[in-house]
Amino acid sequence: MAEAESSMFLFLPLLLLCCLLPMLMRGGMGRPIEIPREVDVWIIPQRIEDVFSAIVREVENWRGKALIEPQKTPLPFLKGGKEPRGRFEISQSIPPRLLKVTDRREGEMVFELTEIEGGGTSVRVSFSPYAKQRIQTFKAQFPAKIMIGWQACPYCGKPTLSDYNLCPYCGQKLRVEKKGESR
C-alpha cells in the first residue's frame, strides 16, 4: 500500500506539469506571445481591380500547393479527432480594397490596396516574419515602374505627391514650412 502511495506522489508532479505546459508555452498566465509584424508597401502601375484579382489568384495558388504538401503532424497518435483546417483561408475580403489571409503556419497576411490618383495602385501588406519570403516572391511578380513625383508617407507608407503638406490618408505633416514660405 505504501509503495502505491509513493508512486502516486511521483506521478502527481508529472500530471501537474502536463496541465501547466500549454500555459507556459504561451508565455505566461494567458498572455499569447506576440510576434512582431512587418510591413511592405509598393506601387504597381495597374488598376486596383486587376491587382486585387491577382492577389486572390495567388492566394488560390498558395492553397493549391499546400494541398499537395504532405500533412505534417507533430505526434502521429494525435491524428484522431477533428480534421486539420486548410492553409491560406481568406478571413476577410472587401474587394478591391482589403484582403486578409490566415495561414496556420505563417500567420495572418493583410493586403490593403489604395487607388492612386495619377494612375496605379498602392499595395500595403502587413505580415509575420514567417511569411516574408512568400511576400517578397509575390511582390517580384508585379511590373516595377518608377513613378515620378510620388513619395511614401513616412508615417503610414501610402503614396503621396511631393508637394503635399499633409498626408491625405493619416493626416500627418509631411514637410516643415520654412519661415517666409507662404502657400
Image (cartoon, rainbow, N blue to C red):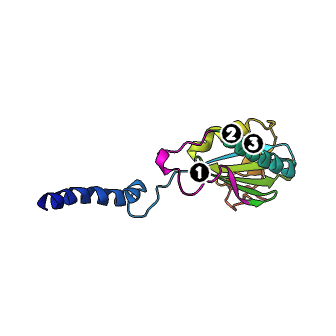
The magenta region covers 70-92
Q: 174 or 178, which is in the foreground? A: 174
Please tell me whether mark 3 or mark 2 is closer to you in this view: 2
Q: Is residue 56 magenta?
A: no
**Mark 2 is on which residue type?**
Ile
Give the image location of residue 132, x and y in percent.
61, 41
**Closer-to-camera residue (157/112):** 112
Mark number, residue 68: 2
Residue type at the position of mark 3: Asn
Q: Earlier in the sequence, mark 3 or mark 2?
A: 3
Mark 2 touching mark 1, by CB under 8 A?
no
Is residue 78 in view from this perspective? yes
Q: Residue furthest left?
A: 2
181, 84: nearer the viewer: 84
Which label is found at residue 104? Answer: 1
Q: Position of residue 34 (x, y in %)?
A: 49, 55
**SS at badge 1:** loop
Using the rendered view, name the quadrant where residue 44 is placed.
Answer: top right
Q: Earlier in the sequence, mark 2 or mark 1?
A: 2
| Mark 3 secondary-structure assignment | helix
In the displayed orientation, state which residue is furthest to the front. 1
Residue picked out by circle 3: 61
